[in-house]
Image: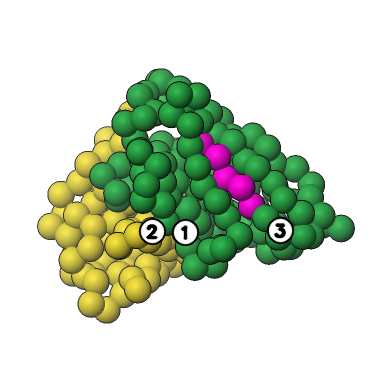
Amino acid sequence: QVHLVESGGGLVKPGGTLRLSCVASGFTFSDHDMSWVRQAPGKGLEWISYISRSGTPIYYADSVKGRLTISRDNGKNSLYLNINSLRAEDTAVYYCAVVRFLEVFDYWGQGTLVTVSS
Amino acid sequence: QVVLTQSPSASASLGASVKLTCTLSSGHSTYAIAWHQHQPEKGPRFLMKVNSDGSRIKGDGIPDRFSGSSSGAERYLTISSLQSEDEADYYCQTWGTDTWVFGGGTKLTVL
């Protein structure tokens, strides 16, 4: 059974940095591409980053390019997202998801909440 | 850049059927899409992929009550025998070269 567990969210001041983690189980992590998707309060889902099974290529949404770094450690079945220069508009629940055939997100985690506020 | 358009809300009675629509922007009518269900306080759940010819691939454990179809630039999700737990936000999603796009979502209320 596929299981994705995000962690690392919390309350952060504007301008701060945060590292989110996603631990995967129930499947061969190294065989699958991964993404991060977020949902701001009262808003819809927004794709923000993708990483292939090998670690390259990597893609970012234009809205976050330059402030996010996605990475993975296949030996630890883990996916990461570093966010710097945090802004109020980064306040959201962040989900990790398995990407199938470069197309659909076919498994999702339960999310971790990031709140950016002074 | 492809854009997906969904109605913000829909409602139907318990036990009835409802058909949700996702419209692809002009020039993108051949795109496949995916449907995701997002219940409150939970992570989203992949329901199915729907191709332009109406063929579909469902996610693991998705009941037969959920079906998908296509017509032109529209992609549909039909939920029959509505249950209270079907009350959720439903998002369509598609993909391009190095980018993934979601529709704005439809909030389904089960009356």
Question: Gap between marks 3 and 2, in whole Å?
Answer: 23 Å
Secondary structure type for disc 3: loop
Secondary structure type for disc 2: strand
Q: Give the side of residue A29 with respect to residue A12, left or right.
A: left
Q: What residue is shown at x 45% (from left), y 41% (from top)? A: A97
Q: Main secondary structure of the magenta part?
A: strand
Mark 3 closeness class: few <14, some 14–19, many ≥20 residues within 10 Å: many
Callout 3 amino acid: Leu
- Camera-side residue: B82 or A39? A39
- Name which of mark 3 and mark 1 comes first in the sequence: 1
Q: Chain of mark 3?
A: A
Q: Is residue A37 above or below residue B72?
A: above
Q: Chain B appears in which tint? A: yellow
Q: What residue is shown at x 40% (from left), y 42% (from top)? A: A55
Letter of the chain in green: A
Callout 1 amino acid: Tyr
Q: Position of residue A80 (x, y in %)?
A: 55, 40
Instruction: Name, please, the residue furthest toward the right.
Output: A118
Q: Nearer the viewer, mark 3 or mark 2?
A: 3
Q: Nearer the viewer, mark 1 or mark 2?
A: 1
Q: Are marks 3 and 2 in contact (CB under 8 Å)?
A: no
Same chain, labels 3 and 1: yes
For label 1, the residue is A60
For label 3, the residue is A86
- Camera-side residue: B19 or B93? B93
Q: What residue is shown at x 12% (from left), y 57% (from top)? A: B53
Instruction: Name, please, the residue furthest toward the bottom.
Output: B26
Secondary structure type for disc 1: strand
Q: Chain of mark 1?
A: A
For label 2, the residue is B100
Callout 2 amino acid: Trp
Instruction: Give the magenta part as a residue range.
Output: A79-83
